[in-house]
Amino acid sequence: MTNRIASFAAALACLAILPAGAALAADHTVTISGFAFQPAAITVAAGDTITFVNEDGAPHTATAGDGSFDTGRLNKGDSASVTVASAGAIDYKCNFHSSMKGTVTVQ
């Protein structure tokens, strides 16, 4: 029992050193379905992770125009996660289907 109390105390001490208002990174999901990113526009915080999940029968990518991320080829049922680091708007597209576009706004 003493080890559990010590572990709990250590965890509380770690939380105490976080800056006020600091948030932990969040996970978001963008689904690829019907030859579209859903949602096509998403707002996240710097450090958050976005998981792209392909539910289409055709392969797709999620490739940032600025080169900050690229999922590579995602076949049906595949997923890939990317972490966004810097604030700003990132336009992305599917390299196989030019009409498929999305935007990530990083705050």
Image: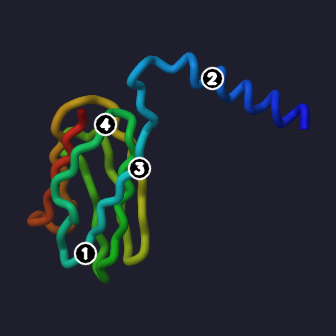
Q: Secondary structure at mark 3?
A: strand
Pointer 2 or 1: first along the chain: 2
Q: Disc 4 versus disc 3: distance between alpha carbons? A: 10 Å
In this rendering, the answer to whether 45 lies above or below 94 is above
**Mark 1 = which residue?**
33
Q: Residue at x 31, y 36 (%)?
A: 45
Q: Residues within 10 Å of mark 3 (few under 14, many from 20)?
A: some
Q: Nearer the viewer, mark 2 or mark 1?
A: 2
Residue at the right extreme, as displayed: 1
Instruction: State left or right for residue 16 relative to residue 52.
Output: right
Q: Nearer the viewer, mark 3 or mark 2?
A: 2
Q: Secondary structure at mark 4?
A: loop
Q: Tell me the number on the disc at residue 14.
A: 2
In this rendering, the answer to whether 52 lies above or below 18 is below
In this rendering, the answer to whether 69 lies above or below 9 is below
Pointer 3 or 1: first along the chain: 3
Q: Nearer the viewer, mark 4 or mark 1?
A: 4
Q: Tell me the number on the disc at residue 67.
A: none
Q: Secondary structure at mark 2?
A: helix
Q: Are marks 3 and 1 in contact (CB under 8 Å)?
A: no
In this rendering, the answer to whether 20 lies above or below 43 is above
Q: Secondary structure at mark 1?
A: loop
**Mark 3 = which residue?**
27
Q: In terms of depth relative to the viewer, which is nearer, 2 or 75?
A: 2
Q: Amino acid at mark 1?
A: Ser
**Mark 4 = which residue?**
45
Pointer 4 or 3: first along the chain: 3
Percent x, y of residue 47: 39, 35
Which coloring applies here? rainbow
Q: Amino acid at mark 2?
A: Cys
Q: Disc 3 versus disc 2: distance between alpha carbons? A: 22 Å
